Every structure is written in C-alpha cells, then in structure tokens.
Image: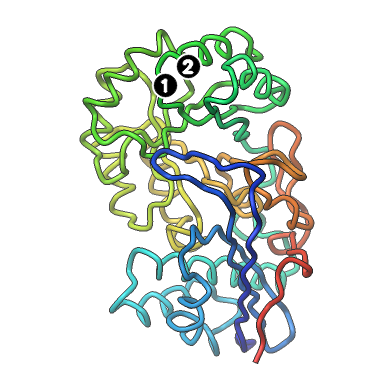
Amino acid sequence: MTTITRIDTATAVLPLPAPLQLGAMTVTRREYSAVQVTADDGTTGIAYCLSREAPMVEIVDRLVAAHAVSADADDPAATWERMLRGSAIVGRVGLVRRAIGLVDIALWDIAARRAGVPLWKMLGTGDAPRDSMLVAAYPSAERSPREVADEVLAQAGGWTNVKISRSPDPAYMRELIAILNLELPAATGLVVDVGFGWPDADTALTEIAQWGDPRLTWLEDPLLPEDAEGVARIRRESGLPVAVGDEVTDPAVLKALVEVGGVEALRIDVVAIGGVTPAREMIAWAAERGVPVSGHVYPEVTAHLGIGVETFARGINPYDPAPSFILGGPSFEGRVRPTDAVGLGFTLDPTVFRFERD
C-alpha cells in the first residue's frame, strides 16, 4: 500500500490595487494558504484556498496533518473520515473543516495522478463544458454605473453568467442593472452578489423594490446562509431567483437552504464544505432534488466536479490575483472545460508558494 508521508504548507499574501467592498467587509489584500501532500512513492498533490485572514496553515499543521500521514494514498475518502474524526472535538464545522478540505483536495489530486487520469474521469463527471460565471465588476461610488457596465460588457461574450457585487446605493443599482439588462448578450445572464450584506428580509425587500425591474439569473447571498426562512421570504416576495451557500462549512445549513429556502441554485465552496469528498455527496443530494449547484471560486477544482464554475478574469485582474500563480488548469472560453492533464491538472508557482519543510 502506498501511503501519505508528509504534508507541507505555505502562505502567500498579494495586495489588491484598490480596496474591495464585499457586503460589510472591506478587502485590501488576498491571503492564500496552500498544501503540498507527498506519498511514499514521490507522488505529490496540491491545493490552495483563500485564507480570509484565518490561520489556515497553522490549523493544517497542528490539527489535521497528523491524521492524514500514513493513510492510504489511493483512498482519499477514508482519509477524510480519519481527519474528521481525529479533529472532531474542535472541528466538525468551521475553520478546521476548511483545513480538512484543503488537505482532502490534495489527496484526490494524488489519487488521480497515481491512477494516471484527470480527476474528472476518476469522479465520473465527464469533460463536457461547464456552465460558467465570470466575476466581472465591483461597483464603487468613484465610478458611474455606465463605467461599471462598460467593464462588464467588455468581458461578457460567451459566458453563461456575469456577476457584479451590490452597491448599497439603490439608485446606482437601478441604473446599472437597467443598462446591463438592456445591453448584455442574450445568452448571458446577470447575477448580483449581495455578500450577506442585508441584515434581514425586510431590509432586503425594501432595497430590492428600488431596483426597478431587475432580470437576474439569481440574487446571490442576500442574507447569512443560516437564515433559510428569510431567504425563502425574499424569493417569495421579490420574485427574484436566489442562490446561497458561499463559505458554508456545515452541510445541514446547505440542506436547509434547499428544503426551507427553496433556492434556485445551491452555492458550494469545495474547500469550506470539507473538500471533494463531502462536496460529491452534497452535489448528489442536490441533484436528487433537481437543484443545480454552482461552485464558489476555485475553478481549477470545481471544473472536475461537473458543476457550474465561477472564475475571475484570467491573468492579472484587480479583484483576485489567483490566476497569476495558477499554472495549468481548465480552459476558459466562455464555458469552462476541465483539463485532460492527470490529477487536478495544475500546479502553483513556486516563486509565490514556498512550502515549509522540516
């Protein structure tokens, strides 16, 4: 049996050219955490995530890694169970589950590399192009709705959906949405990401009513995901489709959004939910109920899962510098096609991530 012998970690901090306002949060930099897992035959697997300023590397090193070392390199699902149970006293949800997810993704990378196949083939999801969502613009008071709309329109061709974040100024949003509803290509939908920016359904409905007649593929993350009843009310009274689930670590919260909130799409963060192993289970559960799943960031991984893929513009962009350190991965041509390379099919720029070794 080939076993896991070591797990190395690294952190990279990359500044943004200008602050981003995401709901109630202001983001001035992107901090990433990464793991490199090594098997005793020399095969390595990698994964990365947005740390959101949390001590992800420390959690992997102190609470998770020991439960993966010596595990079967060809059975990541069994290793996931070991990691979960080994840290269960502190980590069935929350940051520890994110750390488990980071390691789990790298373990699936190793398993597929050892099998000599791309991960999508091991998972049985096929390589058909995935529906895509481009994170296209973050409105700000310094730029007019016309300027922001032009930024979106310049990128929109070929994508299934384009996404903008919400401005807290209803008049601004009314003008911006009206322009995009009129000028976007007919085949490209519009998503507005609220980023959990509203405290309750009453506030949300009051503001939405001032947006005019928005035509959206969905309204994303209007409330904290634990408020499934509030989400259901927003859907019912606004008439807008809703998708929720970003950053959720507890599968029960995602299930309640479907069963109580009746969301049009379920958003899954493959790292936050605990990795490929539980993501597969959640995707199958949603499919049984006819609910499509959209991946939250990490397109290099979600493309293998057979779900909708979210991405920022490739190359250097002002919102997320991850594409600058991803080497390889899927093709982005409007819709997203997973790579035929073995494993996850990408690596991390070694000048950005320097893995700590004993």
Q: Position of residue 161 (x, y in %)?
A: 59, 27
User: Residue type at mark 1?
Assistant: Asp
Q: Which mark is residue 169?
A: 1
Q: Which mark is residue 73?
A: none
Estimate the spatial distance between the alpha carbons at disc 1 and disc 2, rounded to whole Å: 5 Å
Q: Residue at x 52, y 45 (%)?
A: 295
- In the image, taking residue 198 as reference, residue 292 lies left or right, namely right
- In the image, taking residue 58 as reference, residue 349 lies left or right, namely right
For the N terminus, the quadrant is: bottom right
Query: Which residue is disc 2 drawn over?
Result: 172
Give the structural element (helix, strand or loop) at label 2.
helix
The image quarter in which residue 335 lies: top right
At label 2, counting other C-alpha atoms closer than 10 Å, the crowd grade (few under 14, some 14-19, many 20 or more) is many
User: Residue type at mark 2?
Assistant: Tyr
Give the structural element (helix, strand or loop) at label 1.
loop
Q: Residue at x 28, y 53 (%)?
A: 252
- In the image, taking residue 39 as reference, residue 249 lies left or right, namely left
